[in-house]
Amino acid sequence: MNAGRLSIACILFVLALPLVAQRNKTTLQKEKQQNLDKIKETEKILDQTAQQKKSSLGELSAITQRIRQQEALILSVQSEIELMNLDIGENNEILKALQVDLARLKEEYGAMVFSAQKTSGGVSKLMFLFSASTFDQLAMRLKYMEQYSTARKEQAVVIKRVQEQLAEQVLIVEGKKDDKNKLLEEELKEKNNLDGLKKKQNTIVKSLEKEEKRLKQDLDETRKAVAKLDKLINDIIREEMERAAREAAAAAAAAKAKNKSSKETPKASPEAVSLSNSFEENKNKFPWPAAGFISQKFGRQNHPVLKGIVLQNDGINIQTAQNEKVKAVFNGEVRAVAFFPTIGSTILISHGEYFTVYTGLKDVLVKKGQKVTTNQEIGRLLVNSDGISELRFQIRKNALALDPQAWLKD
């Protein structure tokens, strides 16, 4: 009897395990929904670029991003299937344990009935009681019969409870198998979608390879515009550094005049130091300056179509839906607004010794010297002749270019 109750306790403990699996399932479903949301956003960008008659690098970037997202979605579905397999395995183990437990309980119950019959030897209960030689023996026999009757009733209740749990567990396992089959169908569908995307990507690449001359000409014009932009940025930053140095030197000279024994070296203003420190503390927490995906990463990388050509990027490119809003990623002050043919308008914002640069705008909503705050809209992106909206975004610590991806929220 004790063994049966212990087994039931173990089963009830195992039944609690799906709660842990449910938490993992919730995480996976959340991850899958995030992938679906990203896919929806990229599909919008892809549809806009695909409306152009000719293939473009923007369309290639969008389709490449969709492939990455599709692969991530398939991984999410596969992870759900693996978790479902574990669930089914655990539930099958519970089912087997319940079946074994039920068989043992029934065996114990049968043994109790047989023992009761054997003890009474086929004699009626009254004869068994009144055949006692003493009153104490009569009382003991009566107590024994009551306890045995109670034990049999409890055993019957336990058997019924296990039978109900067994029936419920059978339904759970069948439901899990149905869910798994749906996930397998979903996986097959998404894999077919991935194959279609890769075929489309290959078609675009082949089409662009035929336009090598145009691509090289566009690249040359963009490089010239970017070189002018870099010169402007470097000149402004140098001027800012020189201005900050002059102000720090003046402050140090004033302090020395008050205290001739002072040997302090020039320091940046407390406001600039505070802003720089705050900027650093928010690394990996900045909002994205525009909604979209990274179409070109920081640093050196091969051109997606032109063989042997390496691109150098001092920031990241974020491809967006057309006419997307551009927002400041942190509190600061606008230090420059400039326009460059081919790549559009640029806004440079200072944050102490840090600077952020936003290029590719058609509309500028701020002016030089204006204070801006985090998430404040500062402009809107232009749409180029290929129907592409793309923000060139940089973060610099004085003249040093940093990888913006390391500073933005995941």
Image (spheres, helix red, strand yellow):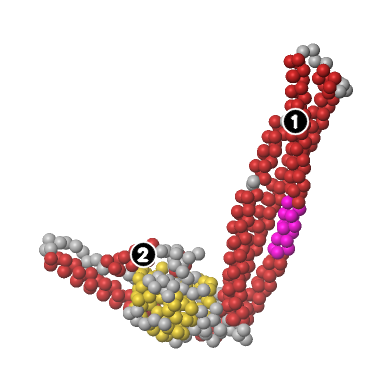
Instruction: Assign a secondary structure to mark 2.
Output: helix
From the viewer's perspective, is the residue at label 2 or at label 1 nearer? 1
Real-space CA distance between mark 2 and mark 1, rounded to the nearest whole angstrom: 73 Å
Q: Judge the density around disc 1: few (<14), some (14-19), many (≥20) Cα neighbours within 10 Å.
A: few
Residue on which the image places disc 2: 278
Image position of 110 (left or right of 63): right
Front-lying residue, 284 or 195: 284
The image position of residue 44, as x and y in percent, is: 60, 77
Location of the N terminus (image quadrant): top right
Q: Where, by quadrant of the figure, is residue 239 drawn? A: bottom left
Q: What label sits on residue 357 in the rendered view?
A: none
Front-lying residue, 70 or 40: 40
Callout 2 amino acid: Ser
Q: Judge the density around disc 2: few (<14), some (14-19), many (≥20) Cα neighbours within 10 Å.
A: some
Residue on which the image places disc 1: 150
In the image, residue 305 above or below residue 120? below
**How many dots with numbers?**
2
Q: Which residues are magenta?
A: 172-187
Q: Where, by quadrant of the figure, is residue 340 drawn? A: bottom left
Q: Is residue 365 part of the magenta span, yes or no?
A: no
Residue at the (33%, 75%) spot, across then down? 237
